[in-house]
Every structure is written in structure tokens, then in C-alpha cells.
Amino acid sequence: MSADEFDPMIERLFARTPPLADEALFLAVFQARLEKRSRWRSLILTAAAVIGGGLALREGVKVNFSDEGGAPVVQGLRSASAAAQGVVQTGLDGLGLGSLDLMSGSGMVMFWAVAGALVAMLAAGAVKLSQDV
Amino acid sequence: MTKSLRELHDVELAVQAAAGGRREYGELVRRHGSAVRGLLRRMGAAPSLADDVAQDAFLQGFQRCAEFRGQGTFAGWIKKIAARLYLKRVAHEARYVAESEVDEAATPVDHARTLDLDEAMKALNETERVCVSLCHGAGMSHPEIAAAMNLPLGTVKSHVKRGLDKLRARLQPATDAGGRSSHVG
């Protein structure tokens, strides 16, 4: 048999791997790992979204309505804003983040530090994955 | 009428997996799990390590499924991921640089037996086994293997050639005699 015939034969032999006996177990373990990873990711993303959204909402409803004693619409907005702020503040207090103020110096620094750390982690993950594949 | 998972082509499954379809990806794992594990074992990994690396490879494959666009086969794509992960795992041992040749006298060719591929692979030293597996099992090119193993290209070519020569010496009598390989490992 020449090398030209032998090489494809080797490739065919490599391609014809019989199913292993514990194929089902392997698949079950994989699905459990995938499920676990996905659950953690969902949990972290949800927590980040809730906290970030809460902070953003609290800052968003701090609207300074300059029309003192003006139209009923403005008064209504002001009261609605105060009510929403109270609800969000209660939620943030529950998470222990009630005192975090993005408009203050330390709050803003912390915000950018966390954002920078997240971007760095994402970049490092992307680099690692590109090296692995 | 929608097709069942088993009727879908690998590329269709991969597209759905890229959109987050875990059931579809599970079908791909079911189809190719044994092949990936078999390749890693042929590369010299112990069964438990092979399974562990294969699991990691499939997890990475799920994350990067969007990058598989149907060029080549899914099996080839996932095998390359698994092979590279395995090489990384064993890299710290640096055993592909300081290799030791298998003593040919200790593993005599038994022409009377019908040798399967896995049996024949035992005649190869570790580096040859990995190089041949990457080349013919994972479908990697010689330059890709050289980069993955951090070896010179010429060295990789030599290992592949020597490995194939040894496989030929072991498999050819069986295949030539019967004109076929009746038992495939």
C-alpha cells in the first residue's frame, strides 16, 4: 500500500470511533455543568442588572422641577418621582447599597472602578478564549 | 413540520446552539462526544483526563458556537478545540520536547494478530502519537500543530512521518492480508 493510499486509510480509522459505553453519562455530566454555569451567569447578570438599574433609576428620578408651585402636572410628577425614589431607595437599602451616591466623588470613582474591572475581565476572558480555540 | 433534533444537520444544530439552544448543543455532544474522547485517548490522555478535557472543550464550544460557520465539520472544529486544550494541560510537563523513543524491541510487531488503530498507536512514542492524532484525527495542518505544540515545523513533519511509518508497519500486514481492516478501534 502506498503512502497515498495509506494516509486516507488512517484518517478513516481515526474518524470511525465507536461510541463509548458511558456516552449517556458523559452527556448527562456535560448538561449538568452547562446548566450550572448558565445558572450562575444568569444570577450574576440579574443581580448586576437589578443593582445597576436601581441605582440608575434612583438617579433618574432625582429631577429638579424648577416650576415651584406650578402646574398640577408638575406637582404630580414631583410626587410620583418622590414615591418612586422612596421605593427604589428601600430596595437599595435592602441590598446594603442605599448610601451609594453616584454623584458624589467616591461613588463615581467606585462606579468607574467597577466598570473598568468588568471591562478588563471581559477582555481577559476574550483573549483567553481566543488562545484556547 | 419541524424536524426532530436527530434529523437536523450539525450545522443547523450549531446555529441554534449559537442562539442559546442547549438541547441542540446537547445533541451535538451526544453525536461527537465519543469521537472527541477517543481522539484525546489516542493522543495519550488517561480516560478520566480525556473526559475532563472533552467536557471543557464542549463547554468552550458552546460559548464559541457562533464562530462555527459550517466551514469544515463540527466534529473537526470541536476536536481542534479539545486537542489544543489537552496540549495546554500537559504543556507544563514539557514532555514533547524531551521525549524518549519507544524501544522497538520491547514492542515487537505481531503480524499474526489483527491490530486495530488503538493497538497500533501504542508503537508510537508520545510526541509521534500526539502529532499523528492532531494531523489525522483532529485535521490540523503541520503549521497548526507546530504552533500548538511549540515545536519547529520540520520536527512536527518528522514526527508525523515516523509515526505513520510505524502505523503502516503495524497495520499494513493486517489490511493487506485481508484487503480490509475488520476491527476498528
Image: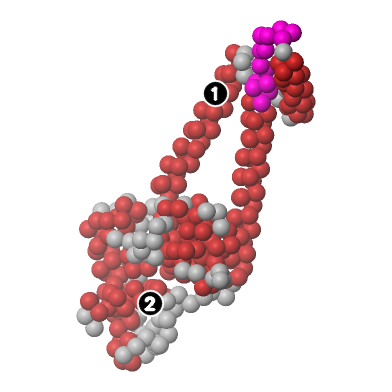
Q: Residue at x 75, y 29 (%)?
A: A91
Q: Which mark is residue A13?
A: 2
Mark 1 Cα within 10 Å, few/some/many (few <14, many 20+)?
A: few
Nearest to the observer: residue A103 or residue A95? A103
Q: Residues within 10 Å of mark 2 (few under 14, many from 20)?
A: some
**Residue A66 falls left or right of residue B121:** right
Q: Residue at x 63, y 54 (%)?
A: A35
Extreme residue in the top direction: A68
Query: Callout 2: helix, strand or loop?
Result: helix
Disc 2 residue type (three-letter): Leu
Foreground of the two, A108 or B52: A108
The quarter of the rendered structure image containing the C terminus of chain B is bottom left
Dot 1: element? helix
* Residue range (magenta): A57-70
Q: Relative to residue B107, is residue B46 depicted above or below? A: above
Residue B182 x/y as whole percent: 40, 88
Give the residue furthest to the bottom.
B178
